[in-house]
Image (cartoon, grey):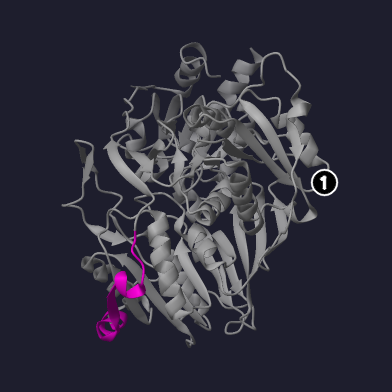
């Protein structure tokens, strides 16, 4: 058996924090495959080398391969999937993993197909060289799956694995970094014309320790103002149910649930959210869940550690005032 | 333009799953079309229309891989307005995303559509893979998790809107291509064929429902059944489900009487703020 390739996304300052749980999963998988963990960083400009140096610091990473090219500046499945497939072949690796971010979900299945490899999506546990556990049916069932192909591919649920930590002692991370040959890049004519970055001072939903979410009961986008204030006061991230996103109250990238983002913060505050199965799938791994809903029968109360039957109109301003009082100590 | 749209049947997600002995019992479930596929059908139909209720041009072919009973959901899609159906008959179980994509690739070779539209994931398997694998097998570009889709007037490319972690991405792909759709694709102005509909064209902010007229018309439309062997492919999964387990359930906690009590508990008891 061979090495485990982990695809790491670069941020402005190093490895994207969302990729760290995939490093942990890769290290667990490498134990079953008997090879080392090879991290792959791809992108454009000096950021690639900086990200690679950052990745090399983490425990379990044996080697970092970098690919720098202007055409890799924006992640695209058309360019990244063949690159990852080639790295797997050239290194004789027997596994490929990445976090199930929007890029990971886009790229990995395409890479798996190019390798003739089976893929498990959103794994929450590594049970063997080719055996994984993953949620299905909106998290109402956990599947144990086995992959029969020589190479196995898996996307990793960010909240299910602890972020990798910097290696003790440090070692010589720079020696681990190797510059890879980019080779031919065929975009198949696809092109990212623009990316309108979400402007937010708040932490990303997947990383936040506190998440405050609003649901259909908020009725209108402007009513999220109070939730935003509460979110910022707590230093958290803002989320929403699918119903609120569908109704156009907030952008879809705030959606928490089966078809949105999966979060597992220390504290999840659900306001005016009834608790549909598909929403619960995205947040029931949270450590502490607070439900605020005017309907005492709402299903959200069945998973909440603390439930408060109240309208958001009264509860949200009161919460803001109480938290302010607490902070003022 | 010709559009191929996938239509998978899934167990109604509102029903409680019957899980026991490492298996899921699906014998008593009711089936429905996967929501994201339904949105894909809506997008495909809009690409063949001049506007809401407007004249149509082009063809929408609905394809399913499933048991004979899956014809029911295909018939529903024909009632929405799709032109004809193709059912590749196979058991629901035992196929992974790779196997389904290999069957679809053969259908694409036969039908030669300009665009294949799929839901971004099915709400039973939750894998989110088939579209991407299909694009790889065909060597076509892909535009996944779409919130917007505009086909250029010359029909040679599509400009798509993707809600990604970094923000909102606009990606242009030449046609033919594979597209997978997310929730926002059913917005009033999310989808448009510039060769047919002007910038003022808009639709209802929902997927359409079958009208009585549509249901009657669908009875006369063709659903062709064929076996995978006829397509020259033997579906064999690379990934097998070997067992199921119910997730640990969460217990309901306590009710608090006031915001003051809530904040005190979060601070002193749970120690999370």
Residue A13 visible within the image: no
Q: Residue furthest right?
A: A46
Determine whether the residue tagged by mark 1 lies in a helix, strand or loop: loop
Residue A171 visible within the image: yes
Q: Position of residue A100 (x, y in %)?
A: 53, 43
Q: Is residue A124 left or right of residue A221?
A: left
Residue in the picture at 36% in, 53% down: B237
Local crowd at mark 1 within 10 Å, few (<14), some, or many (≥20)? few
Residue B218 magenta: yes
Q: Position of residue B235 (x, y in %)?
A: 34, 61
Q: Position of residue A6 (x, y in %)?
A: 60, 38
Q: Is residue B90 above or below residue A5?
A: below
Query: Closest to the observer: A248 or B191?
Result: B191
Q: Position of residue A153 (x, y in %)?
A: 49, 44
Q: Which chain does the residue under circle 1 lie in?
A: A
Query: Closest to the observer: B152 or B14?
Result: B152
Residue in the picture at 59% in, 45% down: A88
Q: Is residue A155 above or below residue B120?
A: above
Residue B30 magenta: no
Q: Residue furthest left?
A: B28
Q: Is residue A141 left or right of residue A262?
A: left
Q: State the residue position of label 1.
A: A45
Query: Closest to the observer: A212 or A27?
Result: A27
Residue in the picture at 49% in, 46% down: A260
Q: Which residues are magenta?
A: B213-235
């Amino acid at each position: 058996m061979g090495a485990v390739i982990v695809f790491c996304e670069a941020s402005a300052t190093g490895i994207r924090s969302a990729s760290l749980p995939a490093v942990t999963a890769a290290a667990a998988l490498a134990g079953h495959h008997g090879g080392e963990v090879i991290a792959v960083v791809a992108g454009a400009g000096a950021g690639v080398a900086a990200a690679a140096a950052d990745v090399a610091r983490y425990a379990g990473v044996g080697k970092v391969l970098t690919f720098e090219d202007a055409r890799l500046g924006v992640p695209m499945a058309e360019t990244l999937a063949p690159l990852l497939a080639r790295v797997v072949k050239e290194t004789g690796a027997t596994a490929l993993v990445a976090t199930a971010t929007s890029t990971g979900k886009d790229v990995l299945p395409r890479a798996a197909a190019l390798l003739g490899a089976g893929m498990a999506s959103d794994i929450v546990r590594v049970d063997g060289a080719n055996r994984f556990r993953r949620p299905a049916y909106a998290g109402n069932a956990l599947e144990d799956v086995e992959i029969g192909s020589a190479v196995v591919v898996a996307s990793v649920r960010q909240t299910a694995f602890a972020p990798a930590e910097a290696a003790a002692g440090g070692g010589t991370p720079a020696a681990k970094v190797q510059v890879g040959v980019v080779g031919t890049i065929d975009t198949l004519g696809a092109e990212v014309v623009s990316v309108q970055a979400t402007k937010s001072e708040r932490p990303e939903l997947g990383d936040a320790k506190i998440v405050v979410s609003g649901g259909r009961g908020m009725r209108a986008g402007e009513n999220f103002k109070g939730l935003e204030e509460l979110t910022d006061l707590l230093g958290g991230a803002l989320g929403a149910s699918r119903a609120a996103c569908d109704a156009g109250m907030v952008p879809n990238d705030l959606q928490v649930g089966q078809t949105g983002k999966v979060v597992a913060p220390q504290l999840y505050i659900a306001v005016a959210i009834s608790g549909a199965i598909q929403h619960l799938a995205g947040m029931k791994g949270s450590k502490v869940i607070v439900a605020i809903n005017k309907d005492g029968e709402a299903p959200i109360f069945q998973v909440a550690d603390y439930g408060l039957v109240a309208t958001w109109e009264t509860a949200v301003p009161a919460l803001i005032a109480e938290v302010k009082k607490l902070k003022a100590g | 333009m010709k559009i191929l749209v996938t239509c998978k049947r899934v167990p109604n997600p509102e029903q409680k799953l019957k899980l026991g002995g490492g298996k899921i019992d699906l014998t008593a479930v009711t089936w429905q079309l996967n929501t994201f596929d339904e949105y894909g059908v809506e997008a495909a139909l809009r690409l063949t229309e001049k506007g809401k209720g407007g004249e149509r041009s082009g063809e929408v072919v609905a394809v399913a891989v499933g048991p004979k009973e899956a014809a029911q959901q295909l018939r529903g899609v024909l009632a929405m307005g799709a032109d004809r159906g193709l059912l590749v008959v196979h058991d629901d179980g035992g196929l992974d995303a790779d196997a389904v994509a290999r069957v679809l690739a053969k259908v694409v070779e036969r039908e030669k559509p300009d665009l294949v539209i799929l839901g971004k994931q099915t709400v039973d398997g939750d894998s989110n893979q088939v579209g991407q694998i299909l694009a790889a097998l065909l060597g076509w570009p892909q535009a996944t998790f779409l919130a917007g889709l505009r086909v250029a007037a010359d029909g040679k490319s599509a400009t798509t809107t993707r809600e990604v972690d970094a923000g909102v991405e606009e990606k242009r792909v030449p046609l033919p291509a594979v597209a997978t759709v997310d929730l926002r694709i059913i917005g009033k102005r999310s989808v448009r064929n510039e060769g047919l509909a002007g910038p003022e064209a808009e639709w209802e902010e929902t997927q359409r429902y079958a009208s009585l007229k549509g249901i009657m018309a669908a009875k006369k439309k063709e659903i062709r059944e064929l076996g995978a062997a006829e397509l020259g492919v033997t579906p064999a999964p690379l990934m097998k489900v070997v067992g199921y387990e119910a997730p640990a359930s969460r217990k309901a906690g306590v009710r608090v009487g006031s915001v003051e009590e809530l904040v005190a508990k979060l601070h002193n008891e749970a120690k999370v703020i």
